[in-house]
Image (tube, rainbow, N blue to C red):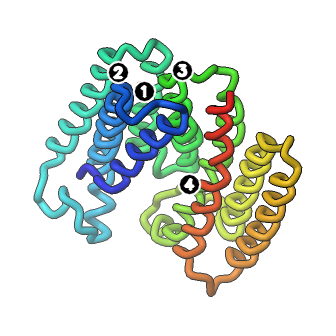
């Protein structure tokens, strides 16, 4: 119901951002960040279980609601309580109005995805908005200057959509059969693959721009982009390629490409 692994990993990522941005491990703000993020993730996960119960039942997936382990009402109650608790902690934390608004926006993105956008060509929108919000939210709490957050938005949005497409491409056939018209289904093959790699390249180039004053690093990064982009294009273009292998290769490269964006906030 709570999707503990992705929820905990996202929370650990937020804590990692806090450490990168200069907060010591014993800083009280880290505990607030972890608690708020975990509650947000639990809320979104529980609502996702409620929203997907029909697809899970038709597909025979061993999920709590179709199996009768939990009622639909329980999932909704958990989702609402998780969101309410996250909002309450955001108010009590004293992080400020803007940080509070970002928490609300993050919850709204997750709920919008669960309730409506997940099954439409706009499935990418919550990812495009919410993924860059996490380091931005933590950066504000850590006291980083707002003018240092621009590269995270500019580079983070295409990288986030690229990750979303990479995650959705392996499930495209099943989604199409179930009537779930995600962006990957709408773009088809090879449109989704080309878009995923193209967005990865755009985000990586923005990330490289953060390091453009370091010529050696720039040349090295450009080489990585060229090799990775060529490999992905070849692999994604082959029907014999294991789709989940391609998915994790692209996601891994996108996450690596995002590192300079995050580090640039600390430098700001």
Q: Earlier in the sequence, mark 1 or mark 3?
A: 1
Cα–Cα span, label 1 and label 2:
7 Å
Q: Position of residue 265 (x, y in %)?
A: 64, 32
User: Who's the residue at 29% across and 30% down the image?
Assistant: 83
Q: Earlier in the sequence, mark 4 or mark 3?
A: 3
| Label 3 residue SS | loop
Quadrant location of residue 5? bottom left
Task: Give the residue furthest to the bottom.
Answer: 240
Q: How many marks?
A: 4
Cα–Cα span, label 3 and label 2:
16 Å
Check contact, mark 1 vs mark 2: CB within 8 A: yes
**Which label is found at residue 164?**
4
Name the front one of labels 4 and 3. 3
Name the front one of labels 1 and 2. 2
Q: As displayed, is residue 183 above or below residue 111?
A: below
* Mark 1 closeness class: few <14, some 14–19, many ≥20 residues within 10 Å: many
Name the front one of labels 1 and 3. 3
| Label 4 residue SS | helix
Residue highlighted by disc 1: 103
Q: Nearer the viewer, residue 3 or 258?
A: 258
Cα–Cα span, label 1 and label 3:
17 Å
Residue highlighted by disc 2: 90
Q: Position of residue 190 (x, y in %)?
A: 71, 69
Q: Is residue 5 left or right of residue 193?
A: left
User: Who's the residue at 48% across and 44% down the image?
Assistant: 117
Q: Earlier in the sequence, mark 3 or mark 2?
A: 2
Residue highlighted by disc 3: 143
């Amino acid at each position: 119901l709570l999707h503990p692994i992705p929820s905990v990993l996202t929370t650990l990522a937020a804590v990692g951002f806090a450490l990168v941005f200069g907060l010591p491990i014993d800083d009280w703000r880290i505990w607030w960040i972890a608690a708020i993020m975990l509650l947000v993730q639990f809320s979104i996960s529980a609502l996702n279980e409620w929203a997907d119960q029909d697809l899970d039942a038709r597909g025979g997936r061993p999920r709590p609601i179709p199996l009768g382990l939990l009622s639909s009402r329980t999932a909704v109650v958990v989702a609402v309580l998780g969101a309410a608790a996250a909002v309450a902690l955001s108010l009590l934390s004293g992080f400020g109005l803007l940080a509070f608004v970002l928490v609300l926006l993050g919850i709204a993105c997750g709920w919008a995805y669960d309730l409506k956008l997940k099954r439409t060509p706009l499935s990418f929108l919550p990812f495009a908005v919410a993924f860059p919000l996490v380091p931005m939210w933590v950066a504000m709490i850590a006291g980083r200057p707002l003018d240092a957050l621009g590269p995270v938005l500019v580079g983070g949005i295409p990288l986030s959509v690229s990750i979303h497409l990479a995650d959705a491409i392996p499930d495209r056939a099943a989604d199409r059969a179930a009537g779930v018209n995600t962006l990957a289904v709408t773009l088809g093959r090879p449109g989704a693959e080309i878009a995923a790699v193209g967005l990865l390249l755009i985000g990586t180039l923005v990330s490289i721009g953060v390091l453009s004053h370091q010529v050696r690093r720039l040349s090295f990064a450009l080489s990585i982009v060229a090799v990775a982009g060529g490999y992905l294009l070849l692999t994604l273009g082959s029907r014999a390629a294991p789709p989940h292998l391609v998915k994790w290769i692209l996601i891994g490269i996108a996450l690596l490409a995002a590192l300079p964006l995050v580090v640039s906030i600390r430098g700001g």
